[in-house]
Image (spheres, rainbow, N blue to C red):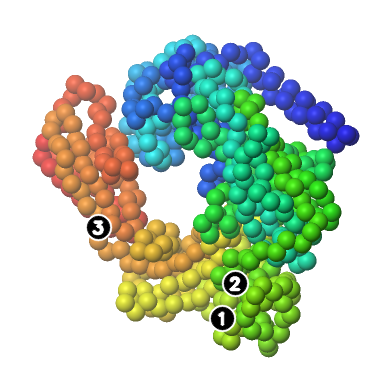
Amino acid sequence: MMKYISITVFLLFYLQGFAQDFEAIDYQFPIKPGQQNYLAGTVGEIRSSHFHTGIDVKTGGRTGLPIYAVADGHIARIKVSASGYGYALYMKHPNGTFSVYAHLEAFDSRIAAWALKEQYRKESFEVDLFPEAGQFPFKKGDIIGYSGNTGSSSGPHLHFEIRDANHRPIDVLSLGFKEIRDNIPPVVQKVAFVTMGKDARVNGFFGRYEFDLIKTKNGYQTKEPINLVGKIGVEIYSYDPMDGIPNRNGIVKTTFQLDGDTLFHEYKEAFSFGKQRNVLVHYNYPAYKKGSRRFNKLYLADGNEHNIYNVVNRGVDFVDQEEILINTEDSYKNTSTTRILLSDEEIRITPKLYRPEQIGNYLHFKSKQQGSVLLDEWVPLKPYAESGEEHYYIWDLRDGTPKSLFIDGETVKTDLVGLLPSNQEISYVQKEFTLNLKRRSLFDTLYLAFEKEFDSLENRELFHFKNQTQPIRSNMEIVLNPEKGYNQEKAMVYSVFGKRYNFMGGEWENGQIKFSTRDLVTYTILEDTIPPSIELKMANADYLKFRIDDELSGIKSFKATINGEFVLMHYEPKRKLIWSQKLNENIPFKGKFMLEVIDNSNNGTIYTKEL
């Protein structure tokens, strides 16, 4: 009872603090106010590397819809970018809060004219501008821009946020906009249990196991009881449907109770941008990278510093508990309850363990013969469980990183090369590479795996860092020591995903190339000697339009001039198009036009035309 009282009191004070920001303003909806709107995304939705910080309002595949100021205020920031939020406006309101409108197609004419002058003054398409407080005032309901599909948007929509005075995005839907209808409770589709200790078991076995849930009149439940022993982490896959749309949106509140005791409570009311990357340890990143959904952990993982948790556990010791209760709630107070009955009787399953897997600090594998691990010498293991002809083994990696495993009469390489602890500056040196970690690079201990390969068909060196499922907090530096010779003016590092290459860059020094990354995947070194392509679409006295592309390293910069004078070219990378906008529409384009496009390996192409 005291736990419930403590949580309730905490939340009352917590919510009261946010309510003070919003109580003086009645915000209107930013697009099609008074009409039912539909969302493609909500606040708190788990994205690949962050929590979504706003709502994505659908525009029916169209652009150019009027966007309205949600309250009185002034434009505090104007940003134009080919990526990210694209064309975006940031509006400050009298109570200190901010509203953000992103992926716009165009700004209000006054804003657009001033931004255009600044683009010409700075001779840059991309600008980040901060007008004076009284320069662009607007009243609630004034049109400030028009919806679009700019930046990293994958389709026409409006991304809309409200931020508190400290620039923390808050749950927009908590303001109760009637334009959004949600009478459907969250769906809880699956539950997962992951062993967090060597003696922990899920239905008799070590590892991570997912279970489908079925819906009943009383909520969700597993098809049969679950037997849990030892330290276990609980996870769920859930989403929030809304009226009239099929999208799977985010859930703002989740509570986990065990036999009536609250062991976990999260509330996605506000977000700190500096902690956003912690989402990689909020959901089960390794499971996701192996093909699963993004399961919400109901425990605090090592290294997770996010501020959305009010009650946490770091894994629960299961002994003889009877019931797990999980409550999920969306922004419109619709709730779902999941009940999982726990059995004290041993329940046997057959794990789908096709290859050795790493679960936290442990290696888990099976073999029909006596299993062993190779350290300096072979160490025989005793199976912890058997199923049919299969014997199951656990190895604690803190006792050593084995070079190989003996499975079914064969030696299987692990490619493990070392153990790197978190929260330390480390320079780890191998013949093929050096890995330089900052103190904040890792969330948790890294069991580094690596293999060097030479692809004779493609004539390339492949540096396989085999920790694709390891979430990395912040950038680390990798120095590659290649054996081949390269044209160092054109050769750069690329990450390799099948036949696709992503440019990473790099700096050469003493025959080595160093680059910064947040992924331990496969890298190679490639030479880009082919300059970008420029394709004329239209060129006359009023308008210029081109398609620009680069097949390997990608576009780094472009610049257009007429008689040496800067001409602004808008850029849409998704369509690979650039097009002109005059500073003065009454002055025709006339004279020598020149367009220079440079790629990331500093290959350049120049196009000229007499206009």
Name the amino acid, label 3.
Answer: Pro
The residue drawn where x is 56% and y is 35% is 240
Q: Is residue 536 visible?
A: yes
Query: What is the residue that sits farthest to the left in this orientation?
Result: 610
The residue drawn where x is 68% and y is 57% is 194
Name the amino acid, label 2.
Answer: Pro
Q: Is residue 170 visible?
A: no
> Would you say 525 lies left or right of 402 here?
left
**Element carrying mark 1:** strand
Q: CA distance from mark 1 to mark 2?
A: 9 Å
Mark 1–mark 2 contact, CB under 8 Å? yes
**Position of 423 relative to 357 (above/below):** above
> Would you say 442 lies left or right of 342 here?
left
- Quarter of the image containing the N terminus? top right
Q: Earlier in the sequence, mark 1 or mark 3?
A: 1
Q: Earlier in the sequence, mark 1 or mark 2?
A: 2
> Would you say 360 lies left or right of 510 here?
right
Q: Which mark is residue 531?
A: 3
Q: CA distance from mark 2 to mark 3?
A: 45 Å
Q: Which residue is mark 2?
A: 356
Q: Which mark is residue 455?
A: none
Residue situated in front as seen by the camera: 517 or 60: 60
- Quarter of the image containing the C terminus? top left
Q: Position of residue 590 (x, y in %)?
A: 13, 32
Q: Which residue is mark 1?
A: 412
The residue drawn where x is 72% and y is 46% is 340
